[in-house]
């Protein structure tokens, strides 16, 4: 799936009157007022016109871009937008005959990576990513690209990717830029995919740190594993569809007569995407295994703590049994002595000659019996 050749000068909407004369009032009235008004928001990053790979002009408004493009039969417009308003997108849709479904997707964002064709216009959704070193997390951005025979429109939702470097690169290689919007699309694809490399390196470093933290027993590592796993799910959603998209573009090389240089570019991008997708799959598998290992280590630590608590409880129980045994042994003679110490006259043992030895012998017998009973039951 690639763009058709630009052998014919296809126009979205033929200008009914190039109007060198200032008399007709419709052109000024037809200019959408939303475009100039929206510039204070800086939603239009840059609008440029190119011809034969060379920069011609940088119009100051969308309406001026439309006018100059009509006056350049062999020109190409490259319009970059960042979080544009609905009015700006609708003006672009009216000028370039963009499909309403594609415009709706560009307005709402939060789309999955995809590639769709609406007549002579190609609509591409890409998910860019960048690694934030300070926060140690992955930030995702969304890029929508409209590609026609003589125009290319980029709509960014998020900080990534920065397409200024792509624009400079294309302007420095006019022979590549002369190949038309298709060449710009491949350069954007290459920039988005190259932006994945620092993310892969940052995630690999995070995984190495997590492995160290897991075996150190850091209690916060479980949360970090979960958050990084969630980011890898998003990263996988951004990279995996690209493989099929690029292979779809490669399948149309012969049909649309794609330039050999562009074919090499796209094959290189496809190789990088495949490699990145495989790395992301490996990261998810590694994080799953690390989470399992961490859960095992946590369980082992909890078991060790429970064992220690059980041993401490057992030792405490043994001490309580010893104390209880000695208390029972000492209680028996105390009971006998207390009974005979009540000094009642009616107690026959008080007048018995062998009363005292009998009481002593009874206390000794009870204490000895209790001692051997407790000893037999390992209480002493």
Image (cartoon, rainbow, N blue to C red):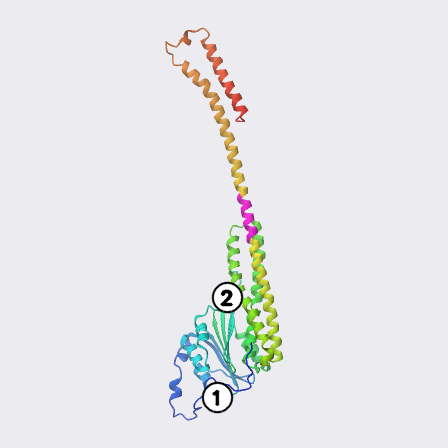
> Dot 1 surroundings within 10 Å: few (below 14), some, or many (20 or more)?
few
Q: Nearer the viewer, residue 112 or 142?
A: 112
Whether the magenta-drawn stretch holds residue 377 is answered as no
Residue at image coords 46%, 17%: 333
Q: Position of residue 278 (x, y in %)?
A: 59, 64
Q: Name the residue under label 2.
A: 140
Q: Name the residue under label 1.
A: 71
Tell me which segment is drawn in magenta. Answer: 291-302
Whether residue 360 appears in this view of the structure is: yes
> Dot 2 surroundings within 10 Å: few (below 14), some, or many (20 or more)?
some
Q: How many labels does the image show?
A: 2
Residue at image coords 52%, 53%: 222
Relative to 22, say whether 49 is above or below.
above
**Dot 2: element:** strand
Residue at image coords 42%, 78%: 90
Whether residue 43 appears in this view of the structure is: no
Q: Nearer the viewer, residue 256 or 283?
A: 256
Q: Which mark is residue 160?
A: none
Q: How far apart are marks 1 and 2 (CA)?
A: 39 Å
Relative to 90, say whether 210 is above or below.
above
Q: Quadrant of residue 165?
A: bottom right
Predominant SS of the magenta segment: helix
Relative to 102, say whether 319 is above or below.
above
Asked whether disc 1 touches disc 2, contact meaning CB atoms under 8 Å apart, the reply is no
Q: Where is residue 366 in the image (x, y as percent from the top left)?
A: 49, 17
**Dot 1: element:** helix
Q: Which of 320 and 101 is in front in this view?
A: 101
- The answer to whether 249 appears left or right of 37 in the picture is right
Q: Where is residue 286 in the image (x, y as percent from the top left)?
A: 58, 57
Q: Where is residue 229 in the image (x, y as percent from the top left)?
A: 53, 58
Quarter in which the N terminus is drawn: bottom right
Q: Quadrant of residue 105?
A: bottom left
């Amino acid at each position: 799936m690639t763009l058709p050749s630009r052998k014919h000068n296809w126009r979205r909407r033929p200008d009914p009157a190039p109007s060198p004369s200032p008399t007709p009032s419709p052109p000024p009235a037809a200019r959408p007022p939303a475009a100039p008004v929206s510039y204070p928001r800086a939603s239009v990053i840059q609008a440029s016109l190119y011809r034969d790979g060379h920069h011609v002009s940088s119009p100051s408004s969308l309406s001026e871009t439309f006018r100059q493009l009509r006056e350049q039969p062999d020109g190409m417009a490259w319009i970059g937008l960042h979080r544009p308003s609905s009015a700006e997108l609708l003006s672009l849709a009216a000028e370039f005959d963009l499909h309403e479904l594609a415009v709706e997707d560009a307005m709402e964002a939060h789309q999955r990576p995809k590639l769709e064709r609406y007549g002579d216009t190609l609509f591409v959704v890409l998910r860019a990513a960048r690694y934030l070193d300070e926060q140690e997390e992955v930030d995702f951005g969304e890029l929508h690209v409209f590609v026609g025979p003589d125009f290319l429109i980029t709509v960014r939702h998020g900080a990534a990717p920065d397409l200024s470097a792509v624009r400079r690169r294309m302007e420095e290689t006019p022979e590549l830029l002369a190949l038309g919007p298709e060449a710009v699309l491949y350069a954007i694809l290459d920039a988005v995919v190259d932006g994945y490399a620092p993310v892969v390196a940052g995630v690999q470093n995070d995984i190495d740190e997590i492995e160290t933290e897991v075996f150190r027993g850091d209690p916060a590592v479980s949360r970090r594993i979960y958050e990084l796993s969630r980011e890898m799910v998003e990263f996988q959603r951004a990279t995996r569809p690209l493989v099929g998209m690029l292979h779809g573009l490669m399948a149309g090389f012969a049909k649309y007569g794609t330039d050999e240089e562009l074919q090499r570019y796209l094959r290189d991008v496809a190789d990088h995407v495949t490699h990145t997708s495989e790395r992301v799959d490996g990261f998810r598998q590694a994080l799953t295994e690390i989470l399992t290992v961490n859960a095992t280590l946590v369980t082992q630590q909890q078991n060790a703590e429970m064992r220690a608590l059980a041993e401490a409880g057992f030792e405490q129980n043994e001490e309580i049994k010893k104390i209880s045994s000695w208390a029972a042994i000492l209680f028996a003679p105390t009971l006998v002595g207390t009974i005979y110490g009540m000094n009642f006259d009616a107690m026959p043992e008080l007048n018995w000659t062998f009363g005292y030895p009998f009481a002593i012998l009874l206390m000794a017998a009870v204490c000895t019996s209790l001692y051997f009973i407790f000893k037999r039951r390992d209480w002493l």
